[in-house]
Image: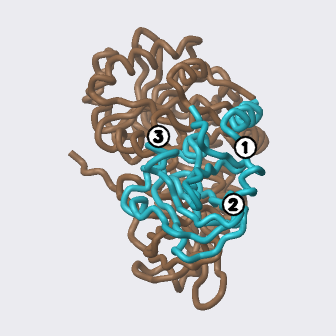
Chain colours: A brown, B cyan
Amino acid sequence: MKKTRLNAVHKEAGARMVEFAGFEMPVEYKGIIDEHLAVRTRAGLFDVSHMGEIIVEGPEALACVQYLTPNDAGKLAPGQVQYTALTTPEGTFVDDMLVYCLSVPDKYLLVVNAANTDKDFAWVKEKAAPFRVFVVNRSDEHSQLALQGPLAQEILQPLTELDLGQMKSFTFAFGKVAGIDCLVSRTGYTGEDGFEIYTLAENPEVIWKAIMAQGTPKGLLPVGLGARDTLRLEAKLMLYGNDISDKTTVLEADLKWIVKFQKGDFLGKAVLEKQLQEGLKRKLVGFEVLDKGIARPHYPVFAGGRQVSEVCSGTFAPYVKKAIGLVYLPIEYTEIGTEFEIGVRDRKLKARVIPTPFYKREKK
Amino acid sequence: MYPDNLYYTKDHEWVKLEGDEAVVGITDFAQKQLGDIIYVDLPQPGKVLEARQAIGSVESVKSVSDVYSPVSGEVVAANSELAQTPDLINKDPHGQGWIVRLKIKDKSELNNLMKAADYEKYLEGLEH
């Protein structure tokens, strides 16, 4: 099992460790609910060094990224970040990811899911063969910390010379944090304001400890993968393997906003165009459970007297205080307010399609 | 850590004998594994249970776990406090976080269960 460079720090902090995507990772420190609420109301610090970092570099890097992804990477200037996907020729997901534009048109960083890093690297390398690019997997050298929550900027600013007040959402800059060279982006996976901090340094625990020291008096907590999952689901951020996969198309996942048909050819374009013309047969929707109980992944979903699907993501959401989830439903059941049932062991619970995201932070 | 006056199961329930009645809950180990508990499915009084039959379930943010009756008996009461404050199980698993009270059918069934020292040894085995 792999360990991140912060492994000892988590154990010192009393984290409960689990295996995730081949890494020994902290699932919780104080408890999922406390950690979740800390991020919504104050701030939380995550070790997400398990995430994958793949660099595409060369004179045709932009053309290559454009071909591999449905969003328009051509819109990115250096210092900008974009949410997008790696798509199959069927318009389904190899993965979802962030693209960081390091240099136009010749250098891009792809940040991918830990569980998919090897698969993605092999995929990108294979599909990039016709382009004049190098593809390098730099995942093992990178550590990544995420500082998320309304107090994130206030906590991080004293530790860096970067002017965080000037850093817009989905942009990044290079600078020192706690004296260590980093890439800092205003991005995250929680639905809150915050930063993701990448470093190649061997001692990222210096950054971790500096942030904890700065933030603890303000209510900062270290946060594990347990609350990372409940936070991202409240904000309706996708989890590969639960909500999206190589069996679901980008349009079915209700991510049409990352598909830019006018930008030129890309993997899956023809299938997605056809799907758009013909109309979707099913779509990913958010639901709340109306009866008492919690819907969890793979629980069967019933509508019109038959099983139509199974739950993708489902949990108790600590901030909105409801049992919520995501499910692909036949298109005739996807209107807001539509009721259906979820099999929870020997019972059937009533559930209802509701608007998403389940939680949306108030913008200042 | 684990009180000497309780009996323990491999599924991490505990039983406390009080006269002809048995109080049942889940152990500190079980509540730690589950994490923050948010919902407890309780049985109705009068329900007759065989040993190892499901009493109900305990749900945390992360997962759901069945609770099995360590002994045979009839449900006399369920801990109604858990409906409002299910996290009593996290805070005081061997006390206020009790789940049901049973009228015990056969006290000799307790001999099948572990004493505190044995349970602690059993847990050590699980953690490696």
Q: Quadrant of residue A305?
A: bottom right
Inspect this view and state whether residue A352 appears: yes
Is residue A1 toward the left or the right of residue B64 in the image?
right
Question: What amino acid is found at the position of numbered circle 2 in the picture?
Answer: Val
Q: In the image, which disc is placed on residue B71?
A: 2
Please provide percent x and percent y for residue B25.
Answer: 56, 53
Q: Quadrant of residue A8?
A: top right
The residue carrying mark 3 is A31
Q: Residue furthest left?
A: A364
Q: Residues within 10 Å of mark 1 (few under 14, many from 20)?
A: some
Q: Quadrant of residue A131?
A: top right
Please provide percent x and percent y for residue A303.
Answer: 58, 85
User: Which residue lies at the image location 43% right of the left edge and 26% below the top edge?
Assistant: A184
Is residue B103 toward the left or the right of residue A134 in the image?
left
Please provide percent x and percent y for residue A137.
Answer: 70, 29
N-terminal of the two: label 2 or label 1? 2
Taking depth in this image into account, of B71 and A304 the one nearest to the observer is B71
The residue carrying mark 1 is B114
